[in-house]
Structure formats: C-alpha cells, structure tokens
Image (cartoon, rainbow, N blue to C red):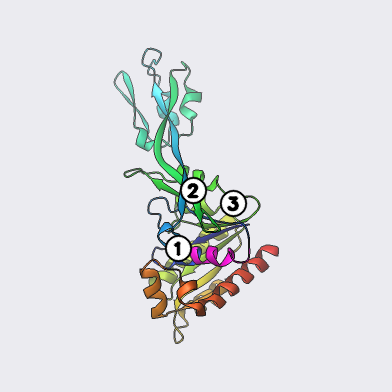
Amino acid sequence: MKIAIASGKGGTGKTTVSTNLAFFLCEVNDNVVYLDCDVEEPNGHLFLNPVLSEKIVSSIPVPVVDESKCDICGECVRFCEYKALVRLGKTVMVFPELCHGCGGCTLVCPQHAIQEQPREIGFVESGNSGKIGFVHGRLNIGEAMSPPLIRGVLRQIHSDGVNIIDAPPGTSCPVIASIRDVDFVVLVTEPTPFGLNDLGLALDMVRELGVPHGVVVNRAEEDNRDAENFCEKKQVEILTKIPDDRRIAECYSKGGMILKDVPDVRKNFEELWNAIRKRVKE
C-alpha cells in the first residue's frame, strides 16, 4: 500500500502526521517504509533519527553538442519547450539547469550531433529508524527541478509493505510526481482561512488525478467548525481531527514523536489508519 501525506500549504503538520503514522504502523505491521519526497527541505529525519546506510547519486541526462557535426539547423532548439537549447550565431548553446532530461533533442537532430551526459542534481539516502525503513532525497542547492530526484526516492518503495510518502507542500509538479501513483492521499489542513483556501486547491488537484483521498484536521479547536463546514461543502471525508494541544506543539518543536509523549493522540492515528484501510478496500 502506498499512502501519501500532502497539504496545500506548508506548516500544517504534514511531516508530524506522516512520521507518527509510520511510527504507529511499525507496531502493527512488520514492513513499513517512510519516504520523504520533500527533497528541497527534507525534515522527516529530525523526528525519526534514522541510521543511514546507503547513498545513491541522482542525475539527469543533459545534451552535449558536437560542433564538428552540428550544421545549426535549429531542430533541437525548436523541439525544446524548456529553452534549454538556444541558437546563437553559428553555435547552439546548452543551459543544463533548464534541461528536463527528456532526450528529445538527440532524437530530432538530423546530423546526430547531440549526445547526452549525466548531470548530478542530488542524492537519495536510505537506512532504518528502528523497524521503520527510511528513505529521503536531498536536492543540490540551486537546482530548479526536483521531480527527477523524487522519482529516485520513489524507486525505493517496497512492494510488499506499507509505504508512507511525505509529499512536498503545495500543488505544483513536485507534489504531483509524489502522489500520482499512490493508493490514497491524506490531505493535512488547519482550520484557518489560509489553510482551508489551500486545502481547496489540493482537493482540486487530487480529484483531477483521480486518487482516493481524505482530510486530517490538525490543531483542531472545539469551538471552531470552519474545517468541518468546509469539508461538508466540498463533500470530502474528515479522517481524524488532531486537537490543538500545547503538549503536541512542545513535543514536535523539540523533534519528538507525539505518539510517545502525548499518548492521547494514539486514538487519532488508530482512527486515521482504520479510515484509510476502509477506503482503500472500497
């Protein structure tokens, strides 16, 4: 099973939910893997404290033009929608940072003047946090494109276990790369105007992708029904509501696991897991 934890905005508690769900599941399932796909700013390791044992460099193929063969026809420039190749006078310049590594320029070049070479964009590290398998990616500073590295993280998915995918925040390409092939998406929100506005954007995204989904309301207040009213209007199920509790805030601000330090929340993660299993079986 592949479960993605996502959110329309940052700061809603997505990593808190994903790391603690992995921690909860490792007690009831022998094969649980946590995959941090927020490769621009991974922070799941701050909570799970894994022992990392493997590092794999991630790269994308970028074009190299052989000027002795190139006749400046411009076919590669016309093909590239990302402007990674530009014709300047009697030469074709390559901007590697803009290249998506699709390889199309090598196919359309009539003179076969373009070859590809790998360009490192980051790395994937893996290991264990107790019984939990741990994988995260780290994008090199200054890199513009994270989806290729995210795909490298997702190649570490275990086919015979429960995979918890901590997706990047927002609704752009990195999020779609993280969640498009999962079995279920948990959208974490907070009962604030900004949180609910961005939850609406995230709902549009997962519905466009056709992925089963539900909502976790974090920092829920007893006298605030804004999230409930919003979800009723959008016809989306609230899987659980994690209370606005100072003990929880103090725990995760220190990098602790709330399931250890605030035992009251165990019922929330039981409720969340049971709701996910029911929805996936449907």
Tell me the magenta residue range.
19-29
Query: Which mark is drawn over residue 126?
Result: 2
Tell which of 109 and 188 is nearer to you.
188
Q: Secondary structure at mark 2?
A: strand
- Tell me the kind of residue under disc 2: Ser
- Give the answer, above or below, for where 148 lies relative to 240: above
Q: Nearer the viewer, mark 1 or mark 2?
A: 2
Label 3 neighbourhood size at 10 Å, few (<14), some (14-19), many (20+)? some
Q: Which residue is mark 3?
A: 181
Sequence-wise first label, 3 or 1: 1
- Give the answer, above or below, for where 16 lies relative to 76: below
Tell which of 132 and 153 is nearer to you.
132
Q: Nearer the viewer, mark 3 or mark 2?
A: 2
- Give the answer, above or below, for where 6 lies relative to 246: above
Q: Secondary structure at mark 3?
A: loop
Q: Position of residue 142 (x, y in %)?
A: 31, 44
Q: Quadrant of residue 271?
A: bottom right
Residue 192 makes an appearance in the image: no
Cα distance between the residues tagged 1 and 2: 17 Å
Residue 28 magenta-highlighted: yes
Label 2 neighbourhood size at 10 Å, few (<14), some (14-19), many (20+)? many
Q: Position of residue 216 (x, y in %)?
A: 51, 71
Q: Residue at x 51, y 65 (%)?
A: 187
Dominant secondary-structure state across the stretch colored magenta: helix
- Tell me the kind of residue under disc 3: Asp
Q: What is the total number of numbered labels drawn onto the structure image?
A: 3
